[in-house]
Image: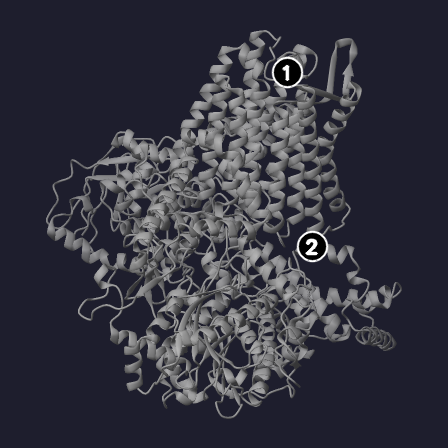
Amino acid sequence: MPQWQKFGQLSSRRDSFIELDLSGWPSPSSEADVVPHFTLNSNGRVAPRATQPFWRWVPFRTTVASAKTAGKQRPIQTAEMAPKFSWHQKCCAEVDDLMIDVDRDGPCNGTTLVNTATSDQPRSAEHYDQATEAMLTQIRDSILKAAELLPSQGPITGFAFLNPLQGLEHLPMSDALRQVKQIYHCEPYLSEDRYRQYVASGRIGVEELTEVVDEDLQQTGSERIAGLATRRELRLHMLQHPLHTGDARELAWVIAETEALQSFLPDTSPVVRERIISETQQWVSSEQAAGRNPDHIAQLAADSSESWEHACLNHLFHTIHQNIEQVDITAPVVSVSRPAELLKQIFHIDCDALVHQELITFCAAFLDQGFAHWRLPKRDRGFFAAYCSIVTANQRSAKRWMKGLAAEIDRIQAARLTPLQVIQESLQLLGVTVEQQPDFLRDSLLALRGFCGMLWQNEFRSDRVHFPCPKDTLVEFMAVRLLLDRFALEHLARNEIKTQLPLSRLQDWLLDEQQQRHQERLNNTEQLAYTIFQIAQFEGWLPQQLTAMSSDDWQALADEVRNFSDHERRRLFHAAFERQLVRRTLDSISLRAALPQVTPAAPELQVICCIDAREESFRRHIEETNPDVETFGTAGFFGIPMYFRSAGDAHFSALCPIVMKPQHWVVEDVVYAFEEQHNSRARARRAIGEASHRLHVGTRTSVLGAFVSTALGPLATVPLVSRILFPRMTAQMHRTVRKFVSPPAITRLRLERSPNVPPGPTESQIGFTLDELCAMGERALRDIGLTETFSPLVIVLGHGTTCLNNPHESAYHCGACAGNAGGPNARALAVILNDPRVRRRLAANGLDIPEDTWFIGGLHNTATEEITFFDLELLPTRQIAAFRAARELFEEVAQRNAHERCRRFESAALDLTPQQALRHAQDRTENLAQTRPEYGNGTNAVCFAGRRSRIRGLFLDRRSFLMSYDSAQDNNTADILARILGAVIPVCAGINLLYTFSAIDPAGWGSGSKLPHNVTSLLGVMDGASSDLRPGLPWQGVDIHEPVRLLFVIECSPDKMLSIMDRNPAIDRIVRNAWAQVATLDPVTTEIHLFRDGQFVLYPTTESKLQMATSSADCYRGHRDNRPFSMIGEA
Amino acid sequence: MNAMNVVNIMEALGYSVVLAPALLLAAIGVPMLIGIRLSERRVSSLTNFGVAIGLLSGLGVLITMLLTGERSVPISVGHMFEIPQEHFHFSLKLLFDRLSIPFVLLTFVLCGVIGAFARAYLHRDTGYRRFFLLLSLFQLGMILSSVAGTIETLFLGWELVGLSSALLVAFFQDREGPVINGLKIWVVYRIADAAFLLAALLLHHLTGGGDFNAMTGQGPWPFGTTEIDSGHVLLVGLLLLIAAAGKSALVPFSGWLPRAMEGPTPSSAVFYGALSVHLGAFLLLRISPLLDASLTLRIAVVLLGLITAVFATLTAHVQTDVKSALAFASLTQVSLIVMEIGFGLRYFALCHIIGHACMRTLQLLRAPSILRDNHARENDLGSRLPEKPSWITSMTPEWMRTWLYTWALERGGLDTMLMNWFVRPFLAFFYWSDRMERRWTAFLSSDDADTAADDVTKAEV
């Protein structure tokens, strides 16, 4: 039985608190701990006599059973402090003191007031733990689960090409896209208008639309809807004709003021129009002849005096409108978990704007990697504690809505609540039930997803930044966020919508409010009626047909039209959009594969490039310029994951795909002969660095800056003007000057370490063991199938880029090297394969590299087309002639490749010569103002894994990743393919999906326009002065991207592919859930199987003849858009 | 060369300095108004051409002045409005002297650079033409302000600068942030402009015209002496100081400066790094003879500069994003310039403005390079950038540090302060007046007092 005890007295009524003095409370019993300081916090004024005081209930897991009012004990129902708790309504009037019951024998053991401050007594702590730990764990789990949905971009300097929807990859893509609008508020597909433009331009064909609709509907397509048309016809027509829609008021205006009821839509075919009019005339006359003259016939006859066209349309519209009004079209209310979101939707009050401004400033300071000269105090104590110290330090300048926050934090700190407990408290106060909790937490996290994502990345990939976030930062963020949300909501509720409702009921109240707004229903009716009116016109439905329809028919019609919503239409459009590309690609690949394979019998030169789509044209031009050259493609880290530091670098950077974490460290050393020079130059560089740092800091702070800027300021115009007007010359001058202080040219990679030492960053731990080197060398060659017919010279090319004034620089580098230039990896591979010891071991494994074969590593600059070669001083004399020839080849290729690239740049004329094109490309990269130094992988659409000889000569328009793989050299279980695809599919699909989503909604998934970008905390970019961090690619990088899923064409049998999918869950998830499309090309025949709905089905080639062209230039000359895949060669 | 000819040449060149940007504005704006879409190339060539003509004319004026030894060339365009009996006129007058020529040249050079930069930077952006239109509007405003010979001409230019700045902040109209911030800046400018306008009226009242000569005496800048009595000097000076503070983001108006970084990078550079933010200092330079006449005014100027300098330095130290950091770095320098003016170091201040404007433009345009620059600097040093403990942390006691940090992070709470002490009372007063008016009209128009009360409650709801 509960026992009532006087609990305490109202000791003071401060501005915003009622404090209960519990000193009179008997000392804590063995069963329970008691709060010595228990705060009932009412918002703003304490208003005991107000009709609905707003109670802020603080201790959690407490049972409040009674409030004694004015001497009369009025027990209210015993209630667990559950979110549904509603005692505040009852203990409203005349609260003089409060009685709080401690029910020691109640059903719930925890019905006591718990204070963590005194819970150091072991038993009570245990008691407390048992009862609440589960709740807290649940909250933490929900937060961590939601963290999977956050953007996976880490620091912008190591750009991560990952699927922005990685957290939803366990779902089929189309299902995931149905949710994204609600979860992320981003567009899943392009706008319907864009697709219609594609239909108009032929990029989406009617046959593809038909196929897609048929496939989508399966058997249900032939069902007739309301006896008017089959579902298939209806959907096809809705796709083919633009359906105008809008706000109810706008539509009313359209009906009243435009020609809508006077003449048929321009889309309606004349035949249909004539048929409707003539049949209506007959109907009316036959009805009249039969003596039947109901209202509608009379109306028709009356209207026909104006014109029959008007009569028909008028009748159609009003029939539809009247009937639709009777139809049940209640839509399920979209569940909104956050009151802030509802406030915005209903009252257009932006609660998040208040909270986010505060959070953005603080998160940026917390994440800062050393930009600010003055670092956040107490950062090492964690997010929550640091924030608390900030708030309590300076209460004076607190914004109006934050008044009281400092006191609240004092209270939290006095009670020693952990961040998780603070979250739980906030959840209760906000009235979030346990069921709503996961969604609420998820949406609260995603509301500021840029910064949350960065906090999370720095927390769990702490190796990627200098100042990582401590464990549990995200949880602490949530504690702060909910605390601020509470204050902001309360402030707005009181001052903007003037309600005295307790915070915990705000959400329910807002939901009711939303329900009550009839606007939506009204809108739905008008929109639906107008949509059906338009459909009726181009479908040619007759007035008599509609008049005869039963109410069930109308319901069916309305449901049908509504089910084929805007989202569904776009989904099908998109499917058709992709299908055309798939068809054209597979046709050309299968036709090309049917042609004889082309492999030089004794290649003059072999070039190994990155899988990157940019290297497709590079390789094609090499082969086109010299047919005796053979090229290969593989992931650009060449199987050598490492942390690398060059002779002029201060830090190691990770050179491997972002999903891996290197285990080895490699450095570049200057050879001993140049050590002296190296040291003196390093000193010179240090002096320059110090001077430039001083200048940098000085001009940004105070008095010193005054003199510096007065004296040197006007000189600043010189580099400014020259960088803009003469970019290339300035860069050249800069380089020449830098040459005097750069590290000497002759260096060596320190690749090998003794097998007795574990790998690490210190001097003795640098490098790999010989065994590891051999394994990496062998694997790199076997992966691409280069095991015999070596040419005398094999060139391995990593790639990187040059671009100025661009925070997204890293996104243009090699994706397989975590956004760094891949030169060192290529160089390392060459060094490994030139090592006689390695060669001996490889020969023992059956991989015999001839003695007169030499490997050279290099770096291909994809922006300037320049190639840097490494370790040339070691080149044996007998290879020099071959190398000279290779260099000449690359010079020619640079021009041709630049020429092909320049067609995509609107600012480059289409009639440039190759020389001019190369110059233009180089100018671009040195221009301070250039936002598109190159287009990166912006045109990717296909990934081919197989022998180059199967598709050599095919113009793939820089749209295909190319991976070399020879199934003949693989074993029965396709182990080589499995390990290749284990990296290739997730990496390439990730690149593609980031481009694709960024192009679909540049402002939502992408980072919007580059123009207002503002680098923050040295980690990412904001828009302008203050916004969420913007992950994703900028619009200027994706404006030419065609958003389609990547199509993998893999040269193997479908069975092998299926078995690889069975073995590798990551691949399986991507392929089965259709985040990428996969086709196999049979290694022997030219059959192609396409993966659809869980199985590989034979793809019937639709074209019979491959388009031929005489050269690459012939394929693209004069065009800026995507070109068909033609075969280069003699017809 | 006879004297008559020289005067004609100078006049022609002087007109050309102002007409070049005005015609440029027309050349870009008129086609937009009547719906002709000029190509990107055309727009940027027009801009280059306009800037080149303006710059050459400005140089021409400078050379002629150097050759003839003339130190001040007033060109009267004409009276907009005149009451001869009262000796009252409202006139457009251009003035070329040691102050305006450097400003004119600076404006043309920087606008030209920004134009060349924006040509590539804004390529394919939907707002390309709008940007160049606003840039030319801004340029016209700057030129008019620089060469203004009367306070009303200066006001005209001043307003054009304000308008184009606010519109460029709100350049990305499809997002909410830029538009809100653009509006906030517009509001701050209005406050400053109100002070300016009052000063102009007062000046007219005192001297019958808005000529600077009347205010600052006949001597060429900076040697004028004012003929107004010192009490009025203080009043006019303080009003103009408020105007200058608004335009140059001095305390307490500093909150708008970082907000202005919403526009595309080149506009941030030219407006808030270089030209616009110095306009307040320019005004103080223009009226510097007034400062000589009133010690109190000079002290006020120095104090305002000092307070702003302390505020901006502290705030700049805690900024975590590159553009805000540059904004407050700019502000530090501007406040030092204001102090220099207060101390009477006019030529130094002028040089400081020019040097600072050029350097800051470069820094702001290169702002996106910060990651690359930092990386390069670290490589040169062979280590992470030295983390020198800031002098603030070493000089303040422990207990104050967090407080000071928070204060700086909150940007001194200036915005909150303006909001609480200025905007809210102002609005409250307006709403109160509104209620009173309703009550009165209701009272006067109906006999029934109850309905009047009802109206008031409705109005409140």
Q: Is residue A179 above or below residue B210?
A: below
Disc sitting over residue B220 in the figure: 1
Specify whether A345 is left or right of A374: right
Residue at image position (44%, 78%) is A1072
Q: Are marks 2 and 1 in contact (CB under 8 Å)?
A: no
Q: Nearer the viewer, mark 2 or mark 1?
A: 1
- Residue in front for this viewpoint, B384 or A978: B384
Rendering quarter of residue A232: bottom right
Is B399 displayed left or right of B335 in the figure?
A: left
Point 13% across, 40% down: residue? A26
* C-alpha separation, residue under disc 2 versus residue under disc 1: 64 Å
Instruction: Pick out the residue farthest to the top.
Output: B229
Instruction: Find disc 2 in the rendering and name its residue.
Output: A250
Q: Secondary structure at mark 1?
A: loop
The answer to whether one can see residue A956 in this image is: yes
Residue kind at label 1, given as amino acid type:
Pro
Q: Badge 2, how many Cα within 10 Å: few under 14, some, many 20+?
A: few
Toward the viewer: A290 or A80?
Answer: A80
Q: Chain of mark 1?
A: B
Q: Amino acid at mark 2?
A: Glu
- The vertical placement of A931 against A952, above or below, is above
Q: Secondary structure at mark 2?
A: helix
Residue A566 position within the rendered picture, expressed as x and y whole percent measured from the top left: 60, 66
Locate residue B56 relative to residue A296 in the image: left or right.
left
Q: Nearer the viewer, residue B331 or B387?
A: B387
Q: Pointer 2 indicates a residue of which chain?
A: A
Q: Position of residue A1085 (x, y in %)?
A: 52, 93
Asked if one can make out residue A170 in the rendered structure from this viewpoint, the answer is no
Quadrant (top left, top right, bottom left, bottom right) of the C terminus of chain A:
bottom right
Local crowd at mark 1 within 10 Å, few (<14), some, or many (≥20)?
A: some
The quarter holding residue A1070 reads bottom left
Residue A625 position, x and y percent, is 57, 76
